[in-house]
Amino acid sequence: MVEGMIGSGKTYFVVNEVLKTYFAFNEERLQWVLKPDEDVAIFSNVDRFTVSLDLVEAIRISGGLNPFFTVPFQKEFSRLKRHIYIIDEAQSTEFFHRKFYDSEIFDFFRWMRHLGIDVYLITQDVTQLAKELQTLPEYHIRVTRRSYSYAKEFRYNYMVGREIYKRRTLVKDLKVFMAYRSSNVIGGGHEVKRFAVKYYVYVAGFILLAVIGFVGFIKYRFSPKKQVVAVEQRQAPERYKVVAVSGEYVYLRSQDGKKLLKTDVSKVIGHVKVGSLVNLRI
């Protein structure tokens, strides 16, 4: 079970775990592919998680949470390969909210490891989950507030009751972000405003402007006039496709698909929207 605020990195933790365990990133195709020695089926409700099947649709076809999350159903459904279920916002009314009760489903969660099944419960607040599920998970991982972390990393605490017995830090990996969409990568009104991130952005921006101003002054003061001709002969800038937006940053892919890069929103010329073509300021 992974617990944390919206945009804190809880979904990133689960996606990273699954990808790094069962998949390898193909640099030529720019996508995650299943490792040759792995045979696993992943179902999730994480938005556009490219390596998973639709958990909500599978539940609907089966007839609902019960029978889907019951021992008899899963014995047959998962008998051919290892199954992993990722349930984002598990405390919602669609899944296992605080007033939810079903003894057959609770029995499944107690016995799922004997069936070779792993379930990741992702929640904003563990106390909002059904009481019977709050203490069942083998691991309880709590995401620290983003204001306590550096802009390029997520920090996690492994909990035993109220005590921290292990800490872990994950550096943001663009390849992981590319595999899914969530509130912490698509930005918009859902992303939590973080003082620390803004602080680093402002400091970096100030330093960058100071450096650019100094370099510009030196060039103007000491460069020969003939360099003006070279400026007028610059080639047309390369265009990039927007693949993800994360707060102050934009993730871009070159049109030939060979380059991935991350840059500040202020450096982008064009409409910053997933799928649009833009230019970078020089």
Image (cartoon, rainbow, N blue to C red):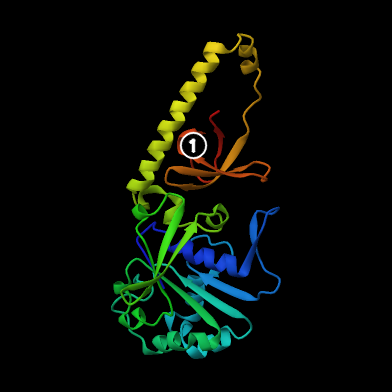
Q: Residue furthest top?
A: 225
Q: Residues within 10 Å of mark 1 (few under 14, many from 20)?
A: few
Q: Position of residue 28 (x, y in %)?
A: 71, 53
Instruction: Say whether residue 248 is visible.
Output: yes
Give the residue at x 60% y 8%.
225
Instruction: Say if residue 52 shows up in the picture.
Output: no
What residue is shown at x 63% (from left), y 13% (from top)? 227
Q: Nearer the viewer, residue 207 or 249?
A: 207
Q: Which residue does the numbered mark 1 point to in the structure image? A: 271
Q: How many marks?
A: 1
Please say if 208 is above or below 216.
below
Q: Quadrant of residue 136?
A: bottom left
Q: Is residue 51 above or below residue 282?
A: below
Quarter holding the N terminus is: bottom left
Amino acid type of disc 1?
His
In the depicted view, which residue is nearer to us: 32 or 66?
32
Q: In the rendered image of this protein, does residue 17 appear above or below residue 197?
A: below
Direction from residue 102 to residue 177 in the image, left or right: right
- Asked where in the image residue 179 lies, by quadrant, the reply is bottom right
Provide residue 23's location: percent of width, then percent of height: 63, 66
SS at mark 1 in the image = loop
On screen, residue 179 versus residue 197, left or right, reads: right
Q: Is residue 189 above or below residue 37?
A: above
Q: Which image quarter is the C terminus in?
A: top right
Q: In the image, what residue occupies the spot 30% across and 74% down?
A: 162
Q: Position of residue 5 (x, y in %)?
A: 34, 61
Residue 35 falls in which quadrant of the image?
bottom right
Residue 152 place in picture, x, y as percent: 46, 50
Front residue (pair 128, 211): 211
